[in-house]
């Protein structure tokens, strides 16, 4: 489908009489699209910063982003079995408001520095080796507020074989956002084999905007930092609504994580009418490289290994849904895998930007246990949902209750709002803002309640 504004651009180049002939003579189809979006988070805790005591507010910020993309279907006029598609897209954005920019650390009497680059503009160079990346001022001053998020080719033969490479949105359960790499699959009868390799990760969303970076790196004995990538192999047997998928994720010199997924869907063709039940179980069993055993991640040492169990249940009854699940870590299972992508299905980046992992919840913490329940409905253009969870872990306990609403005002314009009550109790021996244990530190309770909104328009 060719957009009117694109036709106007062509018109300026070729003239009215040539435009239709040019469009019909192209051997492929194309689509031009774009969007403009704004995201806001308003924290209700305005506690002054005191880095010695571990006292921090909950951040507030407002973003504005815009994106433009072209998608090509290169064989649409030549073949029905062979498909070759391509995409190229970029996003640019920035901050309209940043509550953290001018705050003073009472422990030092000096500016603490903006921390919102953790959402918009994070850039410590591709391998994270920038000499200025150890300070908030360095990161904020070198923020990169643009990204080419799509630049890919995708070939598919009749749903039997496919290969995709370049930059594109990831479909891997444990690697979210946009990936830089390739994936391929082959399918025969009820079986599907899938390989995934990623050498970079980026974000192009209203809340998160990162240029591509290497999530996992390895420093050689000579001191050179290299990227060995993140890889996955998955085999899936699908029979009716039953699915069995053993798989493995690994990053050389970092971790190897054998895993399994088991699922059952009573109504795979559900279209919003009738009843559907979906049950999914994941098991993740990572083993970590010895060089990382004593490296602290999210408050505790990585350790030798760990295990994660995720059980999810969802029911759909016409336009209503109800579900819940449990997420259990044994050891520090998510120290190196599970935080940069996870099939839990709820947002676990809603704490304070000043805490571990730039607003990471302790859902992913050592020995953490989380239980959550949700419900909601779709009523024409109006969508609503409720989500409650409780989390206990070695580092902290959390309780949260959130209400979400969204409305499509037109086909191209929508808005939404979330209000969340969030209580975070950091146990004695740990400190907000510290990635390691802090002996003697007293228990602390922080209010991380907040409101989030979004405005989105597309064309």
Image: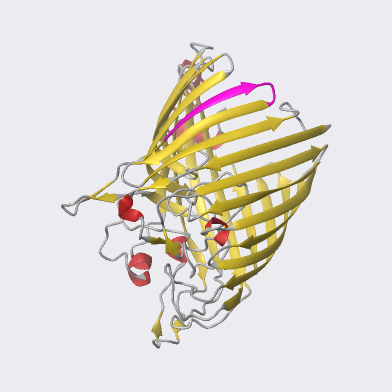
Asked if residue 236 is among those painted magenta in the image, a careful observer would answer yes
Relative to 136, is 381 on the left or the right?
right
Can residue 107 be seen at all in this image of the molecule? yes
Whether 238 is drawn above or below 398: the answer is above
Residue 220, how many percent across, how many down? Answer: 21, 50
In which image quadrant can residue 51 be found?
bottom left
Residue drawn at x 48%, y 23% as measured from the top left: 193
- Quick one: 116 or 58, which is closer to the camera? 58
Relative to 176, is 323 on the left or the right?
right
Residue drawn at x 48%, y 63% as measured from the top left: 358
Residue drawn at x 42%, y 86% as measured from the top left: 107
Whether 68 is drawn above or below 115: the answer is above
Residue that extends furthest to the left in the rendered view of this protein:
222
In which image quadrant can residue 417 be found?
bottom right
The part of the chain drawn in magenta is 232-241
Residue 42, how many percent across, how many down? Answer: 61, 69
Residue 324, how many percent across, how many down? Answer: 72, 48
Residue 32, how many percent across, how many down? Answer: 51, 34
Residue drawn at x 30%, y 42% as measured from the top left: 228
Relative to 281, is 352 on the left or the right?
left
- Locate the N terminus and report the quarter of the image it occupies: top right
In which image quadrant can residue 190 be found?
top right
């Amino acid at each position: 489908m060719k957009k009117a504004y694109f036709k106007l651009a062509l018109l300026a180049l070729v003239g009215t009489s040539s435009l239709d002939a040019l469009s019909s003579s192209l051997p492929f189809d194309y689509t031009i699209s774009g969007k403009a979006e704004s995201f806001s988070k308003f924290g209700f805790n305005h506690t002054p910063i005191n880095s010695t005591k571990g006292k921090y507010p909950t951040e507030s910020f407002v973003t504005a982003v815009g994106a433009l993309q072209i998608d090509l279907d290169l064989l649409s006029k030549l073949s029905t079995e062979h498909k070759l598609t391509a995409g190229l897209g970029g996003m640019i954005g920035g901050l309209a408001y940043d509550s953290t920019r001018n705050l003073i650390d009472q422990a030092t009497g000096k500016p603490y520095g903006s921390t919102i680059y953790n959402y918009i503009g994070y850039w410590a160079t591709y391998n994270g080796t920038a000499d200025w990346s150890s300070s908030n001022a360095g990161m904020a001053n070198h923020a990169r507020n643009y990204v080419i998020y799509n630049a890919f080719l995708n070939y598919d033969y009749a749903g039997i074989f496919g290969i995709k490479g370049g930059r594109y949105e990831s479909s891997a359960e444990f690697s979210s956002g946009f990936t830089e790499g390739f994936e391929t699959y082959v399918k025969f009868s009820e079986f599907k084999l899938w390989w995934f390799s990623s050498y970079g990760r980026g974000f192009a969303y209203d809340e998160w905007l990162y240029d591509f970076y290497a999530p996992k790196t390895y420093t050689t004995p000579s001191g050179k930092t290299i990227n060995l990538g993140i890889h996955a192999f998955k085999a899936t047997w699908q029979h009716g609504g039953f699915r069995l998928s053993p798989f493995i994720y690994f990053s050389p010199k970092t971790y190897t994580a054998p895993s399994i997924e088991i699922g059952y869907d009573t109504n795979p063709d559900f279209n919003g009418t009738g009843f559907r039940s979906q049950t999914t179980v994941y098991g993740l069993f990572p083993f970590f490289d010895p060089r990382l055993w004593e490296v602290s991640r999210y408050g505790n040492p990585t350790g030798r290994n760990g295990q994660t169990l995720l059980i999810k249940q969802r029911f759909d009854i016409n336009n209503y849904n109800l579900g819940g699940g449990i997420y259990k870590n044994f050891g520090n299972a998510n120290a190196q895998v599970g935080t940069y992508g996870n099939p839990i299905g709820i947002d676990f980046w809603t704490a304070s930007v000043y805490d571990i992992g730039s607003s990471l919840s302790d859902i992913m913490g050592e020995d953490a246990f989380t239980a959550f329940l949700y419900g909601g409905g779709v009523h024409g253009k109006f969508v609503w949902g409720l989500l409650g969870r409780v989390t206990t872990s070695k580092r902290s306990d959390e309780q949260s209750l959130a209400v979400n609403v969204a409305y499509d005002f037109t086909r191209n314009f929508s808005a939404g709002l979330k209000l969340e009550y969030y209580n975070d109790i950091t146990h004695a021996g740990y400190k907000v803002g510290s990635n390691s244990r802090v002996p003697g530190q007293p228990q602390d309770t922080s209010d991380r309640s907040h409101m989030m909104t979004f405005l989105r328009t597309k064309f």
